[in-house]
Image (cartoon, rainbow, N blue to C red):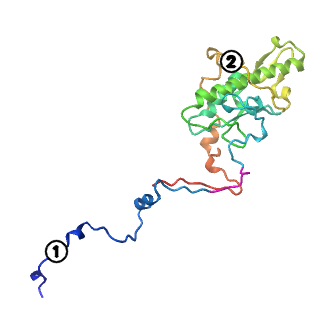
Amino acid sequence: MNTSDLDPIELERYELREQPHYRFKLDRRRFFKVLGCGMVVLLLVDNTAPAQESGGGGRPRGRGQGGRPTEIGAWLHIGEDGTITVFTGKTEVGQNIRTSLTQAVAEELHAPVSSIKMVMADTELVPYDAGTFGSRTTPDMFAQLRQISAAAREALLDLAAEQMQEGRASLKVEDGKVIGKQTKTFADLTKGQKLVRKATEKPSLTSAREWKVAGTSVPKVDGRALVTGKHAFSSDIHRPGMLHGKVLRP
């Protein structure tokens, strides 16, 4: 039989509009249509996980404006070897704030940039300061660390006047030392102990016109470690029992 002799089969009109009764393939569009707004996967971890916000490592928990600690020791510590460790919740993501925040501390504390070590975004150690977002580090944390460093400088002058038995007005701070009739380094004065004073009153800040470190061009802090691959980034961190999360989007 020649099929060309047959009349074409006319479909019923409803068949042209009828949707398939069954779909055996679940595509992404249908998947999210069924789920509505999306899907949330929750993973419960032990509440002793070390990276919870904000740990503070047993640091004093007095809070000032914005819920931040007011104790100098929560932000800054002078070690027995003279290293000045500064704690901040801000993180370096290429904007070079490790260098600029170091400059803020060096300027107000009158200490060498090389003596300052920044501990950034380690939530087990640093005070809570809302994280890194919206270009807030320079107008916010730069000012915060200036205040803390200036308060630490005043506390060191008080310590020096007491230990050296000299009039406070005759003392000056320079290059990580308090200089009078005697000279003592910051490490000599603190002997590794915390500065327990609160930075509740605004100390005298160095005028921008008198800046010698802040606002100037200095070598990038940890620059050599960055270009040689020695610097450890967040993706290089491995902890016992470490878990990973991933964002899935349609």
Please tell me whether the stretch drawn in magenta is mainly helix, strand or loop.
loop
Q: Which residue is mark 1?
A: 10
Nearest the camera: 67 or 170?
Answer: 67
**Taking 137 as reference, is 1 above or below it?**
below
Residue 192 appears left or right of 241: right
Range shown magenta: 43-49
Nearest the camera: 156 or 17?
Answer: 17
The amino acid type, in three-letter code, at marker 2 is: Leu
Local secondary structure at mark 2: loop
x and y, in percent, of residue 217 in the image: 59, 25
Tell me what residue is drawn at x 54 percent, y 34 percent: 134
Residue 227 appears left or right of 38: right
Residue 119 appears left or right of 164: left
Local secondary structure at mark 1: loop
Tell me what residue is drawn at x 59 percent, y 54 percent: 245
x and y, in percent, of residue 73 in the image: 77, 31
In primary-sequence order, the first of circles 2 and 1 is 1
**Residue 21 seen by the camera:** yes
**Residue 84 seen by the camera:** no
